Amino acid sequence: MGSVPQTSLTSPLVGREDELARLTGVLERARAGEARAVLVAGDAGVGKTRTLDEVAGRAAAAGTTVLTGHCVDLGDVGLPYLPFTEILGALAADERFAAVLAGHPVADRLLGGAPADAADAAPSRLRLFEGVAALLTEVADIAPLLLVLEDLHWADQSSRDLLRFLLSRGVLQRPAGGAPGQRLALFASYRADDLHRRHPLRPLLAELVRLPGVERLELRPLPDDDVARLVRSLRERRLPDTTVRRIVERAEGNAFYAEELVAATDAPTGGVPSGLADVLLIRVEQLSDTAQQVLRTAAVAGRRVGHDLLRDAVGLPEQELESALREAVERQLLVSGDGDTYSFRHALAREAVYADLLPGERSRLHGAFARLLAGPDRRADSAAERAHHYRASHDLPEALAASLEAADHAQRVQAPAEELRHVETALDLWTAVDAAARPAGPDAVTLTLRASAAAVHAGELHRAVSLTRSALAGLGQDADLELAARVRYTLAGNLLTVDNLPAAYTYSSEALGLIPAEPPSATWVWAAATHVSTARQVGENETALRVARRALRVAEELGVTDARADLLISLTGLEGGNRATPRGRERLTEARELARRAGNAPVELRALFNLAIGCFESGDLEECLPWASEGLERARSFGLLSSPYPREMRYLRLLVQYTLGHWDEVLRESAGHDGERPAADGHAAGPGLFVALARGDLGAADRARALLKGPFDWMARMVAGLVLTDAAALRGDAEDAVRWMRSSVEALTEAGERPAVTLRLATLALSAVADTVTELRRTGDGAEVARWTDTAAELLADARRSAAHGYDGVPQGPEGQAWLARAEAEWSRIPAAAADPAAWEKAVAAFAHGDVYERARCRLRLTEALLAADRREEAAAEARTVRREADRLGATVLRDRLDDLARRGRLTDPATPQGTAVLTAREQDVLRLLALGHSNRRIGEELFISAKTASVHVSNILAKLNAASRTEAVAVAYRQRLIAPEPTSS
């Protein structure tokens, strides 16, 4: 290999001075102990890799250790943790870090060199994540560290999860007590033009960019002058001006396009191709036949290929291979890297070469790579690559076997989404492979059940239902009864997760009917346990209680501990002492211990969820948080954060933080601080939307409406109903508020039982109606007053009924009683000319259980009632309390309403500076970018919002600051200390 030149990119870097200065500044801060991350965005070929190479070179020259990991496009095949595996491989080759790696077995685990211990057959994903973070931290202790992740748009989900963990809870966290942080920086690039609306990277980027240690840097197309400078610098002899202008025109600011177009000027035809692919292929055709053969073989391997693997695949003598590689490297089609590897200089080059292969040639080469990767020295984590190559080579039996092996590997490293994809690939191949050629083991139905379980663990609940229905359809007439029952009760459980309750009850009934209770069997116990859950959900409590008691006895006799735990959870509430009572919590705690002892993670998580929500329902908010946090930590350790109960617990934890007034924590955690796959539903979005609405975010209602798209989701429907009802009430639209309240209750009603949230929805709508009646009374419209009074009476009746019939049929707890008190107080505004202060005092007292925002809203109403009763001193005292709470929360809507009431009621607070604006968190973000001179479009791109939304925020800022222009708004903001001047260097 010594004869092959180790050249790197030689093209000059033009027009990136600002970006280089920014990245270099981040590196300087990192070397000083302030860990930072930069997400580098740009279109394909715009210069992301070249810019990062330049920065990496400068960093290495300054003594920083630079480690690069590449994400690879393997189509629909995921390769868990690939870029991090590459980084760890580079670390393993560096003698300086041998002692550090020896102390962290996580490296061997990801590199496939150390299987899990027998006592830890399913290694904790949390420990894996924490192990990687600890390893990188110790490496940074030895020398400053720069991690470069390239092509993040191709990252597998597990790599995205690990990246989220590292940036939110790992290497970027500053130690307590002001101690220096890690000497580490992470730069990650991705193609902005590849991120379609449903690209899995988009929600992750939206989360990461909100983290305090993460910033986004976009490489925009180069200006024409810079492209012209680049074009002229690429040739020693001067190009004609007409040629330069033509290349600049064709390149459209893309540095890579420009370089390829310049290179194409050496083609014998002398012409410029019309498309980039044509340019690339012309350059390839200028190579010798042998070099073209090597390049085409390398394209089948992927963006990057090792020397030995390429040599064996191409089948050339070493000397001929080295000569061909030298030619490709000198032409800068390939770049030699560490560890005897070669990479295409740009992914587009590889794609063009690969697309030009003949179908038979492509299939043959894929088969060669598959067979080589399947050799005696094959890595434990190479199954996904082998599956990809076997499938592309049409060797379906081997593709099936490799897909199943890849699924097993994904399961071992806690990557349920990748496991699902590999099992589904196996299912796609199943019927195409002769029965004799299939691997020994599961049949198609059992394999489909495995896929449905992986889908549940990955949060793909509707996909899980679809897969289980497919398993049901695959059962033959002579199917084993136990398997048939298992399919049906699995389908019933999955239908519960998507709120299809009648169908769930039907299938659980069928499952229970297929298996005789005698002789006792574990299958019957689980069928019974599932039937108990579905029966409760459809209101068949007597059936649920009868079956649960019998199944519990059988579970104890057979020693089916996890089923016993599941049944104890279901029995909590059926036999009295629901989950909000000490007796209920005692039973749930027992169930948690039984499930943990049996190693059944989903049942354990169910117990923890019920413990957490029981505390919430009883008003013990502070006690709720530890249970929810324990549940999420356990889910993280099992790789189950996207499964149903952890999603519920995440929402619950956010809701408690929102209720207690920890709104900034809500927004930070909503941005993805837990390392889990983000869920685009009400569980992830709910409390954050409540905060956004209270802080005057005009986009909150639009984001709530977006939750209603797609298949029905109970939580999404509830959150959207709450946000849209409250938003309508805040803008004084009683018609819309009542409409949203009623449609939401109708959609959320199950088995004839109205949801407990009816109380809150009815109260919010009643608030809007009371406002309308008050205004109509001023105008003297008696007919409309009567109509709306009737509506208010209906809403109050809804609220009272809901308060009296909570979960398990018992009255709602402290939270529900507080909302009822507010509903009664809102009603007091309907028949009288002025609200009753006593009613609002009762509401304020009722919310003392912890809901600080609702308590402040009730205090505002109390202030209004006290003013109407001419109790001004008391009103002023309440107003001061509301103002303090509104300012602490950043609740601008509440503050604006208070200011309006203070003006109308002539209440003043000398301690409060007049004219000081209160901006929402989003407006603060916009103002910071406004001060940097960014346009609305640039602000939108930085904050992942539309330019139109950014424009609305700018208009709000101008109005709040009483400024006539953007420049004046920035000046006023500096005077009011809403933003701090940027530090300047000498």
Image (cartoon, grey):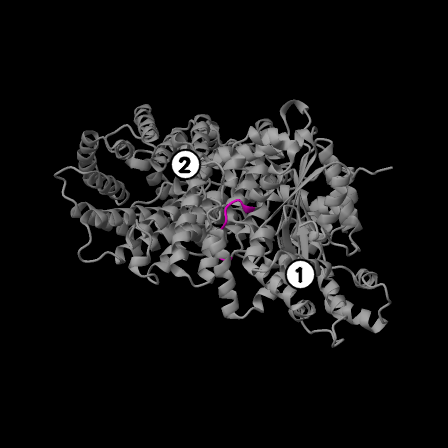
Q: Nearer the viewer, residue 102 or 594?
A: 102
Sequence-first tag of 2 and 1: 2
Q: Residue at x 31, y 57 (%)?
A: 470
Say whether residue 836 is visible. no
Foreground mark, 2 or 1, reads 1
Count neighbours of disc 2 (C-alpha within 10 A) and say few if under 14, some if 14 to 19, many if 20 or more.
some
Task: Report the front residue among 724 and 255.
Answer: 255
Residue 454 screen position, x and y as percent: 39, 47
Name the amino acid type tagged 2: Ala
Label 1, secondary structure: give it: helix
Along the line of sight, which residue is nearer the eye, 368 or 99? 368
Q: Main secondary structure of the magenta part?
A: loop
Per the image, the residue denoted by label 2 is: 122
Q: Magenta stretch containing residue 76, yes or no?
A: yes
Q: Quadrant of residue 396?
A: bottom left
The amino acid type found where label 1 is placed reads Ala
Determine crowd level at label 1: few under 14, some 14-19, many 20+ residues with C-alpha closer than 10 A.
Answer: many
Distance (Cα) linking label 2 and label 1 = 46 Å
Residue 324: which disc?
A: 1
264 relative to 196 in the view: left or right:
right
Which residues are drawn in magenta? Answer: 75-82
Residue at 54% in and 70% down = 358
Please tell me whether residue 857 belongs to the stretch shown in magenta: no
Residue nearest the viewer, comparing 488 with 359: 359
Q: Position of residue 894 (x, y in %)?
A: 58, 39
Residue 697 location (% of width, % of height): 59, 46
